Image (tube, rainbow, N blue to C red):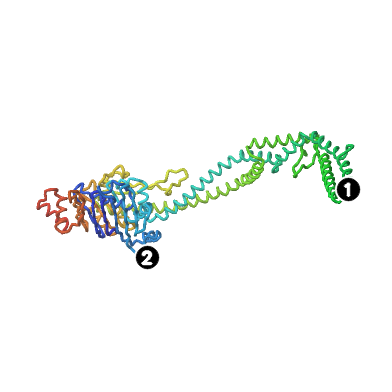
Amino acid sequence: MLTELRISRFALIDSLALELSPGFQVFTGETGAGKSLLVDALLLLLGGRASGEHIRHGAREAVLEAVFTVDHPAILSRLQAWDLLPGDMRELFLRRVISGEGRSRMYVNGTLVPLHQMVELGGYLVDIHGQHDQQSLLSPKVQLRALDEFGGLVKLRDEYVSSHRRWRALVRDMEDLTRRVGERVEREALLRFQDAELTGARLTPGEDEALIQEHRALQNSGRLMALASQACDLLYRDQGAILARLSEVKKLVQEVGTLDEATRQWSEWADSGIAQLEELAFAIRRYTDSVNLDHPAQAGVVCEAGRPSADDGDPGLSRLAWIDERLALLQGLKKKYRESLEELIARRARVQSELEAVATQGDDLERLQHNVSQAYDDARALAQKLSWSRRAVARELEQCIAAELPHLKLEHATFGVELTDVPHPDGLGQHGLDQVRFVLCANAGERAQPLARVASGGELSRLMLAMKTVLAGTDQVPVLVFDEVDTGIGGNVAAAVGQRLRALGRAHQVLCITHLPQIAAQAGHHYLVEKVRENMRTVITVRPLRGEDREQEIARMLGGATITQTVKKAAGEMLNPT
């Protein structure tokens, strides 16, 4: 329950501290006194949208604080899971500071918490019903939720929702895979073409650069042969060749060395020169032997570095012509795919890997179809179980609401719960097989119709109260706030509503803002909200009423500005019925 509420520098409230009690309590006051500001402050404290306009004029920030005592196991478990309620602690301190820029900080037991966590926490602690919230009873979703809460079916419904989501996710996966499998034939044909093209090309790393070098050499083979042969002739073939003349030089310097020891090294130099020239001559002979004069390429010949030659081309094709064709093929592939030779080799590996994956998609689709079927059966079974339970619970809810209606001066009304199949192609809706509709016959002899067609504002208010009374045993929210939900009622009906609010206060802490004396007189605690002037400024104050003060307020609500002895007597009788 909410034990304390402290509000500082909020709108017209300068400083306010309220100590609240269990049970049913009311807040009354003149129209425009600021009663709804209390509800606004509580809404903001529990995560409502804040702005700088909420801050009292002249102040830098507004501060909202509340103290709750918590004893419900489910709420305690949630708080302890969030590490917000240590040990055996049962008190919860909430605080929100709103700055002039609209920014705010929220604390739970001194720990800074994010907005979404405060909003979720607020849903566990307080249920606020405004002047128009009874209209939510017209929503089929709200009606279905109320039925499930009454029957204790929330856990089963959540299981179904999870199962339904899993089934729908698998269906989406299957539809996606089916689409991809449909595209597989075209994709597979493209992949197989690329694989054949790239595999048939027998690509090897660096092949293009090596062929370009060989091509350049073959283009100049005649000139190379002539130059090399001329060098060989000069070295040892021609008359007066260099090696022959150098041998004569060697003989001469050897003889000089025998006559003059200082020149003996000359012979060694001559030997060295002859050896180097002989090595050069040998290299030139090997080169002239290896130079390809563009003779026809031989099938099966393997060129340098293991690269294939023209073994699958025309055997009579010259080596130079074959290289031209090979380079044209490589260049065409590189241009077509806009990739280098190394990237083409990597592409071939990827293509082959994708071909393997495409081949397994059919098996994946069969497995996924099986999983979809199994998930649908699971969801269908839960939906059927939930539907049977709802139909049984619907009759119980009708009986419980029927028992409440006479207490709310609706003794001739009949309430019904209609369940119909969800209009969905596969029969499974987001929340099961059923859609629910609350119907009401407000007058004897008339046909029951949906609430939206027959229920007045006063009847909706009483139906909502009846629903809350019936759900009191299963509703875990400890604090219920009613902000002027007594619209459209008065007299004996208002007195009856007050009695049910008091009864509801046995299971919950009920805070009610009302203009009706018949309701205010039923409360266990009564607070008066007033506007007063302090230091030339308007402020809102709240004070508890007891005894004569409370009787005076009830009399004001009955008679207005002029309070006669008769009105005062009536107020006393309302507060102290015999």
> Is residue 545 or residue 203 the one in the foreground?
203
Amino acid type shown at disc 2: Gly
**Mark 2 neighbour density, 10 Å: few (under 14) some (14–19) many (20 or more):** few
Mark 1 residue type: Gln
Q: Secondary structure at mark 2?
A: loop
User: Residue 134 in the image: x percent, y percent?
Assistant: 29, 47
**Residue, disc 2:** 87
Count of labels in the image: 2
Does 226 sit above or below residue 177?
above
Q: Can residue 399 be seen?
A: no
In the depicted structure, whether residue 317 falls above or below residue 545: above
Q: CA distance from mark 2 to mark 1?
A: 112 Å
Q: Nearer the viewer, mark 2 or mark 1?
A: 1
Q: Earlier in the sequence, mark 2 or mark 1?
A: 2
User: Circle 1 is placed at which residue position?
Assistant: 254
- Quadrant of res 296: top right
Decide which of 269, 60 is in the foreground and name it. Answer: 269
How packed mark 1 is, by other alpha carbons closer than 10 Å (few <14, some 14-19, many 20 or more), is some
Q: Nearer the viewer, residue 71 or 3?
A: 3
**In which quadrant will I find the N terminus?**
bottom left
Image quadrant assignment for residue 295:
top right
What residue lies at 84% left-to-right and 37% top-to-bottom?
A: 229
**Quadrant location, the C terminus:** bottom left
Residue 569 rendering spot, x and y as whole percentages:
12, 55
Q: Single out the residue that lies furthest toward the left.
A: 565
